[in-house]
Image (cartoon, rainbow, N blue to C red):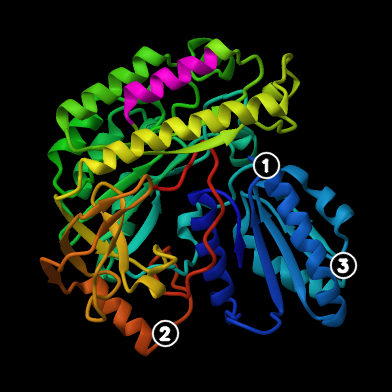
């Protein structure tokens, strides 16, 4: 299973793995697999290039193993459809964002008919959370509250690939959250292309704040996160719910995209710089310790140097703890693709470099403020790539910051530790002193049980099971960015 793109795609891949488990497939950790599935992204140009490059590398492998099947799903499949089998005729199955539940049947049909199967639906067949799911973490999980998007940002192709917003009923969401907690999870992240428009389908513009408060009533749930909200739909009741619900983390990922009102208008973002900064001011007034992260696009068509300087000014005013940054690239099918005044690559690169330098200075300054402070860390798997050589463990603080700390083998993924920050870098914190406290948790117990005896195959109704973590997905789209 190979995943490109945002958290939505990563969560869909958990469902695809669950479907294949339920159909009798067994995940392989080495050797030549019988089935390879690519869950694709269409937001950035390099996602296309990476997919077709990997398909090219697999061609001789498949030639040597005629029974191997290759399936391509996700946003790029929804967009390109038959183009994939034209460019890579050795692909067996192409399926879209609306029918991931069809994959096992399509694989079987491709074997039986000995020809490629391409099935793309124009609307959602079944809400994905009802499908079998192989959860990739014992201690944290994603829960979709909606799929699709009603916005019309001129740079974004997601609405045409994911469809209009479809909201789950609150009871279904809370049942899935409780199931995760019952299986040992301490943390959930509520997912949607635009989480704070949740409720639009059933006519309650305050539904998202109510949902956050309801999560606060679930025993055993220690951390609640969400991504991504849209500034135009952000209401004060959500800020109040974040501040007043103890298990809702004081971290906010809110895409800015540009600090220029002219560019925001061209992007059709429906808010302006003053509105955006006003939300941040309210968040920090209610939660002074909040860590705020964002997405920014550089080089949008027509962006002038003055527009770009407006973005830098907004970044300095917002004091982001980190940001996902993107150089604008043309995506066919979006209004921005045909706009005049496309920015030369050299200009985009120069602005991008200046933005990164500014952001790193700010995030480093913000992280330095935490040196000497005690932080609560949820021990994680795979967060620290150099942990093996440094002897540290890694995890996330409540505000989402990455912390590398001096731990030991008794501290299991899913356990909670308190430690003191001794050093700050732009993208992480170090805590090299002794751990102040270590709490064994149900999540740590679940992780230990996984090591002793792997969990059975996928469970219906989106309930959590445990699997081997896949390679990390590449950076997310500007609409659903990963938690920093």
Q: Residues within 10 Å of mark 3 (few under 14, many from 20)?
A: some
Local secondary structure at mark 2: loop
Closer to the chain start, of discs 1 and 3, is 3
Q: Residue at x 55, y 18 (%)?
A: 268
User: Going by the image, does 201 lie left or right of 177?
Assistant: right
Quadrant of the rendered image containing residue 198: top left
Query: Where residue 161 sits: x, y (%)?
Result: 64, 40
The residue pinned by badge 2 equals 454
Q: Main secondary structure of the magenta part?
A: helix
Query: Where residue 443 sits: x, y (%)?
Result: 26, 71
Local secondary structure at mark 1: loop
Where is 483 relative to 281, above or below? below
User: Going by the image, does 363 lie left or right of 41?
Assistant: left
Q: Residue at x 31, y 70 (%)?
A: 392
Magenta highlight range: 307-319
Q: Nearer the viewer, mark 2 or mark 3?
A: 2
Local secondary structure at mark 3: loop
The residue pinned by badge 3 equals 115
The residue pinned by badge 1 equals 122
Q: Nearer the viewer, residue 154 or 273?
A: 273
Quadrant of the rendered image containing residue 229: top left
User: Going by the image, does 53 lie left or right of 169?
Assistant: right
Kindly tell me whether residue 102 is visible in this rendering: yes
Closer to the chain start, of discs 2 and 1, is 1
Query: Where residue 450 sits: x, y (%)?
Result: 36, 82
| Contact between labelled residues 1 and 2, with CB atoms less than 8 Å apart | no
Where is 77 relative to 157, above or below? below
Which residue is situated farthest in the bottom direction here? 452
* Placement of the N terminus among the 4 image quadrants: bottom right
Kindly tell me whether residue 195 is visible in this rendering: no
Query: Magenta segment: does it hold 95?
Result: no
């Amino acid at each position: 299973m190979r995943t490109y793109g945002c958290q939505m795609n990563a969560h869909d891949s958990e469902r695809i793995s669950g479907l294949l488990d339920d159909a009798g497939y067994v995940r392989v950790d080495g050797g030549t697999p019988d089935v390879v599935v690519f869950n694709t992204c269409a937001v950035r140009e390099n996602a296309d290039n990476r997919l077709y490059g990997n398909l090219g590398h697999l061609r001789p492998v498949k030639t040597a193993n005629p029974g191997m099947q290759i399936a391509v799903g996700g946003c790029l499949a929804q967009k390109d459809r038959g183009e994939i089998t034209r460019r890579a005729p050795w692909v067996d199955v192409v399926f879209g964002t609306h029918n991931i539940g069809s994959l096992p049947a399509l694989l079987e049909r491709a074997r039986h008919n000995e020809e490629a199967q391409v099935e793309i639906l124009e609307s959602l067949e079944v809400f994905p959370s009802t499908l079998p799911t192989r959860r990739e973490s014992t201690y944290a999980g994603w829960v979709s509250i909606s799929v699709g998007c009603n916005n019309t940002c001129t740079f974004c192709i997601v609405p045409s690939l994911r469809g209009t917003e479809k909201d789950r009923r609150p009871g279904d969401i809370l049942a899935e959250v409780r199931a995760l907690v019952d299986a040992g999870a301490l943390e959930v992240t509520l997912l949607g292309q635009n989480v704070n428009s949740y409720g639009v389908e059933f006519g309650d513009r305050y539904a998202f704040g109510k949902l956050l408060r309801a999560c606060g009533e679930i025993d055993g749930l220690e951390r609640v996160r969400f991504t991504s909200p849209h500034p135009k739909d952000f209401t004060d009741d959500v800020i109040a719910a974040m501040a007043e619900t103890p298990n809702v983390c004081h971290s906010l990922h809110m895409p800015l995209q540009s600090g220029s009102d002219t560019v925001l208008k061209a992007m059709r973002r429906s808010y302006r710089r003053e509105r955006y900064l006003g939300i941040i001011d309210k968040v920090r007034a209610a939660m002074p310790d909040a860590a705020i992260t964002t997405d920014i696009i550089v080089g949008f068509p027509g962006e002038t140097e003055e527009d770009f300087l407006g973005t830098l000014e907004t970044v300095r005013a917002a004091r982001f703890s980190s940001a996902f940054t993107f150089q604008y690239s043309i995506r066919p099918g979006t209004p921005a693709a045909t706009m005049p005044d496309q920015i030369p690559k050299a200009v985009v690169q120069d602005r991008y470099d200046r933005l990164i330098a500014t952001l790193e200075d700010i995030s480093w300054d913000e992280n330095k403020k935490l040196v000497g402070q005690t932080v609560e860390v949820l021990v994680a798997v795979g967060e620290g790539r150099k942990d093996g050589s440094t002897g540290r463990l890694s995890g996330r603080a409540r505000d989402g910051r990455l912390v590398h700390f001096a731990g030991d083998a008794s501290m299991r993924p899913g356990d909670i530790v308190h430690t003191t920050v001794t050093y700050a870098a732009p993208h992480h914190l170090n805590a090299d002193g002794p751990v102040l406290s270590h709490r064994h948790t149900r999540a740590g117990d679940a992780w230990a049980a996984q090591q002793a005896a792997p969990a059975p195959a996928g469970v219906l109704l989106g309930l959590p099971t445990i699997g081997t973590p896949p390679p990390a997905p590449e950076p997310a789209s500007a609409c659903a960015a990963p938690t920093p």
